[in-house]
Structures are given as structure tokens and as C-alpha cells.
Image (spheres, rainbow, N blue to C red):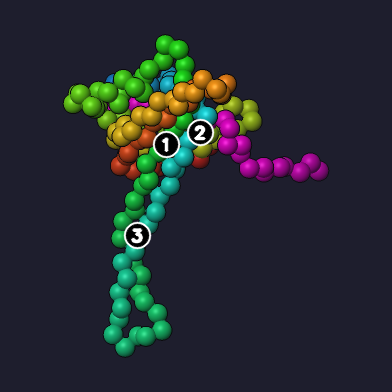
Amino acid sequence: MALIRNDPLGVFNFYLTLIDSSNIVGSLISAALNYVVAGFSECSGLEVTMEVMEYKEGGVNDYVHKFPTRASHTNITLKRGVIVLEDDFWKWHQSFVQGTGKRRDGLIVLMDESRSPAKVWKFKRGIPLKWVGPSLNATQSSAAIESLEISHEGLLLEVGA
């Protein structure tokens, strides 16, 4: 009998899709086409922390009651190589700087070895907080890297999407 291996997924095979959350038709079209906006070399900030309220009950001195209150989400940071003729994240960030920006939902899709979606993290109502351009240095031959930090209002996980 053949054993089925359940290896961990690699962290190198992922992409990002942005969805206009203010436009239902646009959201459906984006989701239906599974439109890949960008591949990144690094994604961090897929993190949720639960806050607790402590209650010190009178007469109970051996422990403190802890009750869950609310969840907080860290900002998502994406890094990628600078690509000629692609400035979509700069434009999204600048639209907020100029006061005309629209929040976007997003999907961060981690794929398995066969390039099928294995896990999908969906963030809600994202705002591009910080765009960082490449550090330029004439004495180095490394790739030019840009990063985008996105604040959001919640993170959901779908397995085997």
C-alpha cells in the first residue's frame, strides 16, 4: 500500500490579487477570472492576535480570569522586484495621497506543487499605507526591490480554494 505524504507547502509559490470592494461587478469579474495582479518575492504580516481582558476575582488568588475581547491584525508587507512599465502599486498609493483612493480587498494565494491554490488569505478594505522604492547603489548588482505596506480590517483563511 502506498503511503500518502503530507508535506508542508513551500513558501515560494504565491501571488496577490486585488479586488475593488466598492464595485460588486468588478469584484465578481476579478474573482471569476482569478486575475493575478502581481507575484512577490516576499509577503509578511499574515498575523492575527487575540487581545484578552484580565479579571481579578476577589478571594481567588491562585489565578486571574482571562476573557477574549477582540482580534487585531498586523499590516501586510509585500516586496517585489521593480518591473519596467508596472507602477500599479505606486498609482494605488498615490491615489490615497491625492485624496481620491479606493480601498481594495485582496487575496494572497499560496499554491501547491501543481500550482493549484492550496490556501487563500483574504484581507478586507485594504489601504496602501507605505510605498518604499528601491535603494539605488552603483556599487552593487542586486535587483531593485520595492515594497508596499497594506493596512486592512480583517483577514480570512480559506483552505483548498
- Amino acid found under the numbered disc labelled 3: Glu
The quadrant of the rendering that contains the N terminus is top right
Q: Which residue is mark 1?
A: 77
Residue placed farthest to the front in the image? 139
Q: Decide: marks 2, 1 in contact (CB < 8 A)?
A: yes
Is residue 11 at all visible to an observer of this figure?
yes
Q: Amino acid at mark 1?
A: Thr
Q: Residue furthest right?
A: 1
Which one is closest to the eye, mark 3 or mark 1?
1
Residue stretch rendered in magenta on the structure: 1-24
Predominant SS along the magenta part = loop
Q: In the image as oriented, which residue stretches furthest toward the bottom?
A: 59
Establish if 20 lies above or below 65.
above
Q: Secondary structure at mark 1?
A: strand
Q: In the rendered image, which residue does mark 3 sit on?
A: 51
* For residue 70, side relative to residue 108 (left or right): left
Q: Position of residue 130 (x, y in %)?
A: 33, 33
Please state which of residues 92 and 130 is positioned toward the viewer in this rendering: 130
* Label whose residue precedes the other's in the sequence (3 or 1): 3
